Amino acid sequence: MNWAFTSSGNVTETYAAGLLREMLEIPSSSYQERALADYLVEAMTGLGFDAHIDGVGNVIGVIERGAGPTVMLLGHMDTVSGHFPVRSEDGRLYGRGAVDAKGPLAAMICAAAGAVDFPGRIVVVGVVEEETPRSRGAMAIRATHARPDALIIGEPSGWSSVVLGYKGKLDLRYTVKCPATHPSNPVPKASELAVACWDALVELLGPDASHAVFDRPGATLCQLNGDLTTATADLSIRIPPGFDVDALVNGLRDRLPAGDLDVLNSVAACRVGRADPAVRALVSGIRQLHARPRLVVKTATSDMNTLAEVWDIPMATYGPGDSSLDHADDEHIVLSDYMRGIDVLTQALSELAHLPVRADDPASAAPLPVRSLR
């Protein structure tokens, strides 16, 4: 028997831990994912996937097990910059991407390979450039890939929690130029106008704006560069469901006496209900491990936002790992939680096997706890 599998067909814990460690050993900051993609094609092929790299660099692995629904498990390969040595210590595995989001992606690969009784099609996708404003990998998947019957996004939710939704995001850039003048001249200077733009945005959003509340917008002054003659301000607004982006942009432009305000990126908020089939499947998997599931919403964004804009299907976000460690210098995952995450996903796939196949399938709220970190 292949040493990667147990006698029942599940991926062994030894293989699962080794897979994640190998993934962490390969640096894959945004735009530099190819080495990891090559490794995953080889690893997934060895686990029984039909795997390839698409035109933008995404890894796509497919397991066909007869007629039935198509379930997509999608995580991202890229990390923020700052690779550091991988090490194991006290049951924890340290490395850039351990939770965000190589741990969830590795768990998806192992769960799909071990879901031997799933009577349909499982598609595991490792996308590129999730940590960038454009999310080019997910954008390519939604444009070129057939819509599945259900979708699970791989991000660190904690092994016993399921994410129902994310705030959206609006990225703006304000640029202004002014004639050269003496600092004592009372006319507005470029740097002052950039600061005034930020002040105007804060005023427009109102006193209740907050990053800590899902149903309210929250703004960040990401970058401010300027002098007397030229200035640039980069502004990012996390937006709740139903937020009127056009009204905000137009209102802010009306308050600016000079300069240009450009929309760099805009993605809508997303949220599914507690009864969503993908949510229920993950909740069932958590309960099978005798834990009490938590349902949460997050105030950041993920590829769930990107795909929810065009795919009206059951979906949720799930993955082992503590999201407060995203991008941290001590980023790590508890290996026992990683193994539980694989078990939860395996059970969820078993539940999703009963989904009806969509007619266009080519193969055939109460308040929630808010987490401010991804």
Image (cartoon, rainbow, N blue to C red):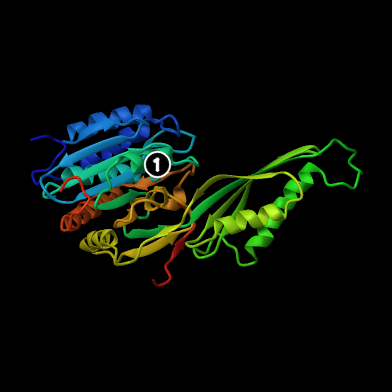
Residue 192 in sight from this viewpoint:
yes
- Which of 200 and 99 lies nearest the eye of the viewer? 200
- Vertical placement of 218 versus 303: above or below? below
Residue 351 on image: x %, y %? 18, 58
Q: Is residue 150 left or right of residue 202?
A: left
Residue 126 on image: x %, y %? 33, 39
Residue 330 on image: x %, y %? 46, 43
Residue 11 in sight from this viewpoint:
no
Q: Is residue 334 left or right of residue 298?
A: left
Residue 36: image quadrant is: top left
Residue 341 on image: x %, y %? 28, 51
Q: Residue at x 78, y 42 (%)?
A: 190
Q: Residue at x 17, y 40 (%)?
A: 63
Residue 46: image quadrant is: top left
- Which of 262 and 214 lies nearest the eye of the viewer? 262
Q: Is residue 97 left or right of residue 173?
A: left
| Residue furthest out toward the front | 360
Residue 259: image quadrant is: top right
Kind of residue sitting beneath label 1: Met
Q: Callout 1 environment at 10 Å: few (<14), some (14 to 19), or many (20+)? A: some
- Residue indicated by mark 1: 139
